[in-house]
Image (tube, grey):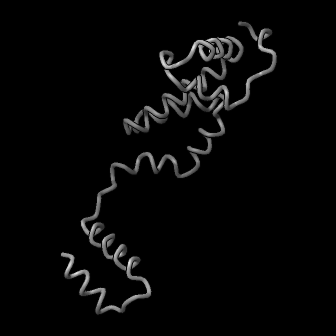
Amino acid sequence: MTSAELCRPPSARTITRPITLKCDQLTKAETLTVAAIERGAPALVEAQSLVDRFQSIVRRKAEADLDPWLQDAGTSLIASFARGYRQGSGRRACCHHRTLVERPNEGPVNRLKLVKRQMYGRAKLDLLEARLIGAT
């Protein structure tokens, strides 16, 4: 199936699903579509591999792999994403996991807010205090 055999170019939605799935999860028609896309648009294949690498970096929290990825992505179809990621808060968010520490008072504060929402407009501070103390 060559690019001439495709009557009209498939939509972005039609392309996105097959190229993001693994080869063994595709139907025969999707496999043929992916093969035609790979032959006709090698830049799209490169962009897909960069997206896979980025997902892997974020999942593994591999901060050291970000700079080489940003360099590779800077000259591809996803260059605007890489530029925005470099300038924006994405880099800080990816690297913030090392400094993030769960505070010990988050659970009780969350429980207090939940009870306040449940009792909204029904009672004053004394009943709220009795409910919280009784709940512990």
Looking at the rendering, in which quadrant would you find the C terminus?
bottom left
Q: In this view, does 107 lie above or below 55?
A: below
Give the tally of numbered discs.
0
Q: Which of 53 and 110 is in front in this view?
A: 110
Is 91 or 48 nearer to us in this picture?
Answer: 48
Relative to residue 126, is residue 11 drawn left or right? right
Q: In this view, does 95 lie to the left or right of 7?
A: left
Quarter occupied by residue 104: bottom left
**Corner quadrant of residue 57:** top left
Location of residue 81 in the rendering, given as x and y in whole percent from the top left corner:
62, 40
Task: Name the side, left or right, on which 2 lies relative to 52.
Answer: right
* The one of 95 and 132 positioned closer to us in this rendering: 132
Give the image location of residue 131, x and y in percent.
26, 83
Residue at 19% from the left image edge and 81% from the top image edge: 134
**Residue at 67%, 16% in the rendered image:** 37
Q: Horizontal placement of 45 versus 97: left or right?
A: right
Which residue is pictured at 36% across the width and 73% down the height? 114
Residue at the farthest top position: 1
